[in-house]
Image (cartoon, rainbow, N blue to C red):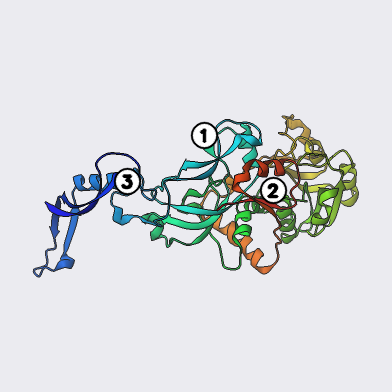
Amino acid sequence: MLQTKAAVVREVGDAHALKVETDFFISFSFSFSASPSLSKSNIIIMFSVASRRVLNTAASTSVCGGRNGLASLLSVRCMSSIPSTMKAAVVREVGDAHALKVETDFPTPEMKPGGVIVKNQYAGINFIDTYHRKGLYPRDLPFVGGQEGGGTVAAVSDEAAEQGIKVGDPVAYSVFGSYAQYTAVPAAKLLPVPEGVGMDVATSCVVQGLTAHYLTSSAHADLIKPGEWCLIHGVGGGTCQWAAQMAKLRGFKVIGTCSKGKAEAASKLGCDELIVLDEVPGAAYEDYESVDIVSRVMEVTEGKGCKAIIDGIGKSTMDISINSLAHRGIFISFGNASGAVPAFPVLRLIGKSAFVTRPKLLDYTTTRAELVSRADEIFGWLKEGKLNVSVDCAFPLEQAAEGHLYLEAGKSRGKVLYKID
């Protein structure tokens, strides 16, 4: 037995239940080297299972370790300032934007093996967040909103430390629960933010930037080649603002659609043709009946149509997209801004032997290597000035509902964020 100083929990409770005792007894065993000359370096002290349980109990109130964390306090690397509760925008019942409630005493997430805790500076607001909030894409309740964030590493597990991740590293990521002061993130999901890229811009890259990247590089299954036409709906803001620029970087000729109110922003993206539509007041999409888009597409493409169509609008543009396809072209439906795309008979595609896909980001970032490869190309374009990212505005997290209302009303002319203190 050994008498030592230890942080001990004798009764569960708040942080003051963790008491420092100077005369705590622990047991240990020795394993000696076979070397004839013994020194301190030859002695390996291994705590017994009982000792580990004591220390794990003491660690159980720690955000950095948690009850499922590492057995020894010595293996935890974290900022001492991480609180046990935090500010977060929480959904306890699905509904409209006001279902997103800001709470100041939500439990701070526990760090898991192989993960880190990130202290968020920004969280991205995306349409998929509104689908979760409404219940269109069901999630277990309650949940912290968001799935895109950026900030600095506040705590590191041993496994993450072995990968070179350190407290204070600037990172961006995509996991659930970013509408909060702190988020638990697997190390494999972290994207190091390079010097010269602002945290607001880096945060904007994660969902919208990576989505635009896979839409323009992979989802089309190489059915479009450089020099061929691509139609992208809603290039005035959000993901398709990125997609239009990336499609041009890939060498495609681009037709973009946008509302009159977003025409100025859209005109700076380099589209070869811009179709400007009337606005739908209070909606996140344009009036797609105000212009005969199919006729205009066929005129611009000399009757050939588009080899790839990137459509995040959904219900209002489905027919337009299918009818604008070229022979053996692909309809890429990735969003539901105007409502979900209704079911349609596959026989509709026979006239042009066309293809259709309904992809999602997770299936195009299935490995760490794929995720980093996409992010590296995006960050490279940003640093070279080949991509222009428009950050529209940043709402304080306390105005969580207002951020969703702004996005859903179609007011954004770029990325919309939460600024988190």
Residue position for label 1: 142
Query: In the picture shown, does residue 345 fall above or below 388?
Result: above
Residue 359, placed above or below residue 44: above
Q: Whole-percent x and y of residue 94?
A: 60, 31
Which residue type carries mark 3?
Answer: His
Q: Badge 2 is on which residue?
A: 220
Judging from the image, what secondary structure is the residue with disc 1 in?
loop
The residue sitting at 29% across, 49% down in the picture is 71
Q: Is residue 373 left or right of residue 317?
A: left
409 sits to left or right of 4: right
Nearer-the-camera pick, 328 or 31: 31
Residue in the picture at 65% in, 37% down: 97
- Return the x and y of residue 11 as percentages of the image width and height: 27, 39
x%, y% of residue 204? Answer: 63, 54
Task: Residue at 28% x, 44% y: name it.
Answer: 57
Quadrant of residue 42 within the rendered picture: bottom left
Q: Which of pointers 1 and 3 indicates the residue nearer the eye?
A: 3
Residue denoted by label 3: 16
The answer to whether 61 appears left or right of 34 in the picture is right
Q: CA distance from mark 2 to mark 1?
A: 36 Å
Q: How many numbered marks have been drawn onto this rendered protein structure?
A: 3
Q: What's the distance in space between the residues labelled 2 and 3, CA to CA?
A: 57 Å
Q: State which tag comes first along the sequence, 1 or 3.
A: 3
The residue type indicated by label 1 comes to Pro
Pick whichever of labels 2 and 1 is earlier in the sequence. 1
Q: Helix or strand or loop: what does disc 3 sit on? A: helix
Crowd class of label 2 (few under 14; some 14 to 19; many from 20; radius 10 Å): many
> Marks 1 and 3: CB-CB under 8 Å?
no
Q: Quadrant of residue 388?
A: bottom right
- On screen, residue 8 versus residue 410, left or right, reads left
Element under disc 2: loop
> Amino acid type of disc 2?
His
